[in-house]
Image: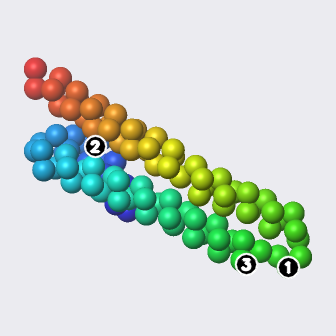
Amino acid sequence: MMLAVAYYMAIQGIAWTKVSMMGLTLLLGIVGTMLLFYGMRALIALIVKKGKGNKQLHVFTFRQIQENVIHQSTSMAISSLLILAALCCFGAGVGIAGNE
């Protein structure tokens, strides 16, 4: 939810009304991104635990996905935050163009 609010603020240009709003947008984006990836880890772990009995390939596949999410979560979080920053700049550009 925090990440969705941060993206909404960035897209609508709310982030550029004040410096404090930009800080709030970035804070919501960072916290929301970290919570998203921690939640993904927990969800994948739950799916692995509830997996069907002795299907070793099923468990192996989910373990690979879980490891990839854990090991790649930093790069995915950075990519998400860069997209958020780009949307903030886009919102600022639209606001500036609309005033001229």
Residue 78 in sight in this render: yes
Amino acid tagged 2: Ala
**CA–CA distance in space, label 2 to label 1:** 45 Å
Local SS, label 2 = helix
Q: Which residue is mark 3?
A: 50
Given this view, does label 2 or label 3 mark the residue nearer the observer?
A: 3
Amino acid tagged 3: Lys
Name the residue rendered at 43%, 63% in the picture. 35
Tell me residue 32's x, y (percent). Answer: 38, 59
Q: Residue 53, which numbered label?
A: 1
Tell me residue 10's x, y (percent). Answer: 28, 43
In the image: residue 32, left or right of residue 74:
left
Q: Residue 10, which numbered label?
A: 2
Mark 1, Cα crowd under 10 Å, few <14 / some 14-19 / many 20+, is few
Given this view, does label 2 or label 1 mark the residue nearer the observer?
A: 1
Q: Residue 42, which numbered label?
A: none
Residue 46's place in the image compared with 1, above or below, is: below
Q: Nearer the viewer, residue 51 or 73?
A: 73
The image quadrant where one finds the N terminus is bottom left
Residue 19's place in the image compared with 24, above or below, is: above
Tell me residue 83's x, y (percent). Answer: 40, 38
Name the residue rendered at 50%, 59% in the picture. 37
Local SS, label 3 = loop
Residue 12 occupies quadrant: top left
**CA–CA distance in space, label 3 to label 1:** 8 Å
Amino acid tagged 1: Gly
Tell me residue 24's x, y (percent). Answer: 21, 54
